[in-house]
Amino acid sequence: MRAMWEVLLMLFLGVFPNTIGSTKPYKSNSELNHCHCLSWRVAVEANNVKGWRTVPTQCLHYIEHYMLGGQYESDLEMIMDQISNYIDDIVLTANSSGMNAWILDVDDTCISNLLYYRGKHFGCNPYDPMGFKTWAMRGACPAVPTVLKMFEKLVENGFKVFLLTGRDEETLGQTTMYNLHNEGFIGYERGQSAVLFKSAMRKQLVEQGYRIWGNVGDQWSDLAGDCLGEKTFKLPNPMYCVP
Amino acid sequence: MRAMWEVLLMLFLGVFPNTIGSTKPYKSNSELNHCHCLSWRVAVEANNVKGWRTVPTQCLHYIEHYMLGGQYESDLEMIMDQISNYIDDIVLTANSSGMNAWILDVDDTCISNLLYYRGKHFGCNPYDPMGFKTWAMRGACPAVPTVLKMFEKLVENGFKVFLLTGRDEETLGQTTMYNLHNEGFIGYERGQSAVLFKSAMRKQLVEQGYRIWGNVGDQWSDLAGDCLGEKTFKLPNPMYCVP
């Protein structure tokens, strides 16, 4: 019996080496890697790591687990709660001029490319423009469910929702419209020109008299430039960076 | 012997209930709380949660562990690496006009209030202006070591480093200067007026001909307004928000 308790004790010491017999936290290599990759991800989200090209290879499994293990959805929900409260506040105060606008990005905001990036080592592989085009041509990007809910709330509340995308209109415009429609994005306003950059598009809307209440995107470049809108929201994306 | 193996097996199943016998990740209450509080912290760092007043009470232990368990330091180091690389790039290209400026915030950028906030449940308690003043009057805020290193690198490389603080000059100016000096912040430029807000101070510097290369602070309000600088860096602070 005593031997068994000794085994159990050793087992516990093995399982919880960091909490017993040490005040200073000892970190294993895998914990150090987790710690480092979490710092990298947060630095990306806070725009402290700028213009990066690929996910650090040591963070492949961390990002895989982040995207598929529930934290990504939790992060999205947290932001959608903030946006939802903000929408409720606006609806109470804004007059219904018909000129109340919101801007949403498309890729990895409205619709998800996670299935594609899964095949690209979650962004550890370098950007592959042809590969992405082939994927986008399939028109099979699933909706990001929490963003679709927010989109529906905006449309219900009378906002004009503009979807702005960097996708090439000539080759991908039709497919992207079908994709968005099939996934439930119905009732948005069409941007007049894909030639204009997002910042110029927003400026045009403001010149037309629109008030941009919110601007939502997964890239910091979506939230830079002119006429950003009253509030901006950065959705998580640790897989790629559009400079 | 068989009984002991059964005990060991049960023990393992108890310790790792999520990894055995289930493909879909099952999360315990404590894991869900961790997941939620991590989402909250990242949303604060990405400026998605704006103008918050206190840390959610359910996140007290999460934030305590974040601040004391090594992740906070790791996050700081990640950002300091980015800044350091950026400094190296500037030094190679900038001419030495003597008008190359950097802006650093003081509280929880140069010097730390962690010891104070430890007594305030890491920000779960509401802001206590008198309590904070009493703490600041002691002039005992320790340097943030990684920021001090960056500060020294900036001074060595000939940048004019301006420390901007929202602290009241009349009551805390002298003490804060001693505190900074004692902690190794030597050779910075003194802001001319504490009456001006940070944004107005930066504007004045630009009007005087300074080029602001970088702007570093732990609050999004440090990084808003006019003349932000070429690049801004948001240091982590999940304990309080200055609107």
Image (cartoon, coloured by chain):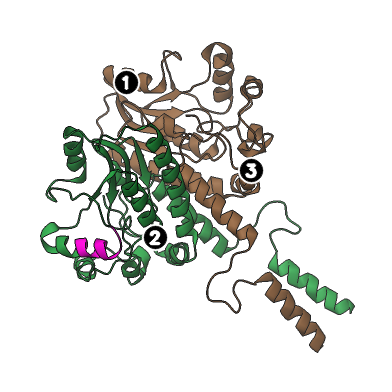
Chain colours: A green, B brown
Question: Residue B57, which numbered label?
Answer: 3
Chain on which label 3 sits: B
Q: CA distance from mark 2 to mark 1?
A: 43 Å
Q: Is residue B67 above or below residue B36?
A: above
Q: Is residue B156 above or below residue A173?
A: above
Q: What x and y, as percent, mark residue B19?
A: 59, 74
Viewer-proximal residue among B122 and B183: B122
Q: Which residue is farthest right?
A: A2
In reply to whether residue A183 is colored magenta, the answer given is yes
In the image, what residue type sits under mark 3?
Thr
Q: What x and y, as percent, mark residue B49?
A: 46, 41
In the image, what residue type sits under mark 1?
Lys
Q: Are marks 1 and 3 in contact (CB under 8 Å)?
A: no
Mark 2: few/some/many CA within 10 Å (<14, 14-19, 20+): some
- Badge 2 is on which residue? A145
Relative side of A191 to B156, left or right: left
Relative side of A125 to B64, left or right: left
Q: Secondary structure at mark 2?
A: helix
- Pick whichever of labels 1 and 3 is earlier in the sequence: 3
Q: What x and y, as percent, mark residue A228?
A: 28, 37
Q: Which residues are the magenta region?
A: A176-185
Q: Which residue is farthest top?
A: B170
Res A139 → quadrant: bottom left
- Badge 1 is on which residue? B203
Frontmost of labels 1 and 3 is 3
Q: What residue sits 39% from the left and 60% below the top? A: A145
In the image, what residue type sits under mark 2?
Pro
Res B13 → quadrant: bottom right
Residue B50 in view: yes
